[in-house]
Amino acid sequence: MAMGVSLPVERYLYTSSQSRSLQDLVTCSRLLTTFAQKDVTFPSTREYQLAAAVMDACEQGDVEAFTQSVYDYDRVTKLDNSKTGILLRIKKGLEMEQDGLT
């Protein structure tokens, strides 16, 4: 039985925000892979595409790519306050890293 998409995405976003602050992109990548294995439809969803784009932007240290991927997702599917807050924390950490503050 496949897991619902929203639960893996919320877990991924929450854990990635925590892992991001610890500079642990390996854990984020493993979680994304695990969710994709648990729900074979997950990789074809917009949520997976958002999570993968966020992960790529973090790996590259690219704040603009991060912002664009979140903007593109939010144009079609509005992010709720909880997800927006998590994504803003990730972005702030990314900006601090880019500015050499971490």
Image: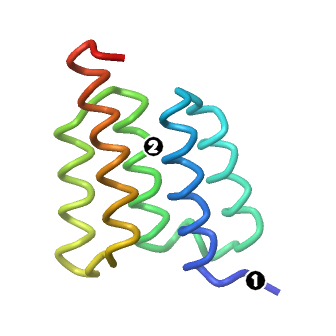
The answer to whether residue 64 is above or below residue 37 is above
**Furthest residue toward top:** 100
**Disc number at residue 55?**
2
- Quarter of the image where one finds residue 81: bottom left
Sequence-first disc among 2 and 1:
1
x 52%, y 27%: residue: 23
The answer to whether residue 45 is above or below residue 84 is below
The N terminus - image quarter: bottom right
- Quarter of the image where one finds residue 65: top left
Q: SS of the residue at dot 1?
A: loop
Q: Which residue is mark 1?
A: 2
Marks counted in the figure total 2
- Quarter of the image where one finds residue 58: top left
x 24%, y 31%: residue: 95
Most foreground residue, 41 or 63: 63
x then y, percent, for residue 66: 27, 45
Q: Amino acid at mark 1?
A: Ala
Separation (CA) of disc 2 from disc 1: 23 Å
Question: Which colour style is shown?
Answer: rainbow
Q: Is residue 55 left or right of residue 72?
A: right
x then y, percent, for residue 32: 62, 53
x then y, percent, for residue 21: 49, 34
Dot 1, how many residues are within 10 Å of its Cα: few (below 14), some (14-19), or many (20+)? few
The answer to whether residue 101 is above or below residue 37 is above
The C terminus - image quarter: top left
x 56%, y 33%: residue: 25
Most foreground residue, 102 or 52: 102
Q: SS of the residue at dot 2?
A: helix
